[in-house]
Image (tube, rainbow, N blue to C red):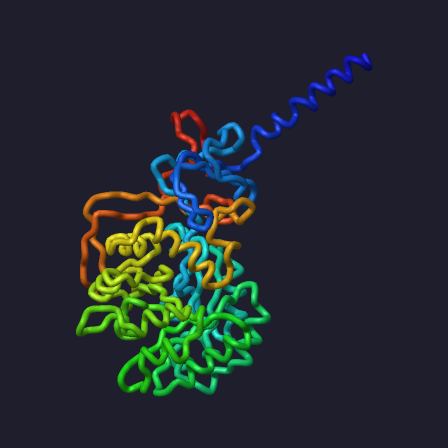
Amino acid sequence: MPVLNRILASLLLAILPSILGAQSYDVLLRGGHVIDPANEIDGVMDVAISGTNIAKVAAHIPPADAKKVVDVEGLYVTPGLIDLHGHVTGYGGSIFPDDTALPTGTTTLIDAGGAGWHTFEAFRKEIIETAKTRVLALIHIAGGGMVSEAEGNLDDMDPEKTAAMIRKHRDVIVGIKHAHYPHPGWDAIKRAIRAGELADVPVMFDDKIFTNTGRHSREKLLDYMRPGDMHTHTYNDRQVEIVDRFSGKVHDYAREARRRGVLFDLGHGGGSFMWPVATRAMADGFPPDTISTDLHRSSILGPQPDMPNCISKMMLLGMSLQDAIMRSTANPAKAIRRFPEIGTLGQGKIADIAVLRHSEGIFAYKDAWGKKNTGTKKIEAVMTVRNGEIVFDVDGLAFPEWKSAGEYVRIQ
């Protein structure tokens, strides 16, 4: 018997690894076209998830190795989209992120200035810590955040207190926002930059460049903004005039700012994406460095600029899907210094994934000023995986088939 026991034990040890390995992954996304610019992947691959992390990206991962297999053949699989400019707090038009981000393949959303140093900790408790979406923040240089009485109050723009709040919450605050300062001069911009220097973070600028402000786009881009700072609303001619109105060409000072390291963000919104500006800028070789929505209550009902919609619009203007995905994943992750923590399907990284459908037909796309353009390509989200969990599945790809009325009885 001892000999037999040793033989049985040896057999068990021999087959146990294969038995355990049969379900070494929790989820397998099978047969999709993976676009992961960070890892230079562009082709049909399988993506395996274990727990909350990407376990493997490879061709032909055995389905028997996974507890759940999801067939995504004919669809695109990308890192979870990163929206560099959204509104989920403070601002009157803010939207709870899970309601609008996750159904669009967006797993990370950066709130652009809703909270300032007075209000940030309440924002963290009420929104950041309750949402499934990864919510990060650009803290407003105005202590009260994105409300008109605060944004015009220079006395409440305290670089030291803003920097102190960033240092205290560096895990979720990734930069500073300056916006909507209505008075003349550069003092508010200088304070935002000073706070950025103290905390070593970039600043996103959404500035009013009007005749009565005494500010000019060229000065802002070349004399004040630092390498790594971000100008949002790139294709809006009210904030920074990218395209010369006489020649229809991109201004030399915009190109010089880009050469210096200033980043240009799409920031579509309800008033900041215009077909004439976007079309001419793209034709003249000036795409945005990052694609973002500036999504809020009014823009979501008008031009509807969620991330897939913005990607579709850029494709209409000649950008490839691969390039658009790069500007919606790896590029924004780098802009906020969170790469390669996010923005990639690299092995061991958090499993944040977007599954996208690319359709062809005739589709209407609206700019922020109520003008329509038609295109032949459309990108839309089919499934979203956040932190390893399938949180959105519009076609029920991960759902088992219902066979008959007698299959089960559910008691409410």
Q: Is residue 28 visible?
A: yes
> At x 53% / y 37%, what residue is drawn?
26
In the picture provided, is 403 more to the left or to the right than 139? left
Q: Where is residue 80 in the image (x, y as percent from the top left)?
A: 44, 50
Q: Residue at x 52, y 69 (%)?
A: 122
Residue furthest to the right in view is 2
| Quarter residue 296 falls in | bottom left
- Residue at the spot 56% in from the left edge and 63% down from the top edge: 171
Q: Which residue is drawn at 43% across and 37% down?
A: 45
Q: Nearer the viewer, residue 21 or 286?
A: 286
Q: Is the residue 383 above or below the residue 25 in the image?
A: below
Q: Position of residue 125 (x, y in %)?
A: 54, 65
Asked if 290 appears above or below 32 in the picture, the reply is: below
Q: Which of 171 and 297 is in front in this view?
A: 171
Residue 113 in picture, x, y percent from top left: 43, 71
Nearest the eye: 92 or 143: 143
- Give 125 or 267, whichever is nearer the viewer: 267
Marker count (numbered): 0
Location of residue 51 with respect to 408 vertically, above or below:
below
- Residue 90 visible in the current orientation: no
The quadrant of the image that shows the N terminus is: top right
Image check: 162 left or right of 288? right
Please provide percent x and percent y for residue 326. 39, 53
Relative side of 45 to 375, left or right: right
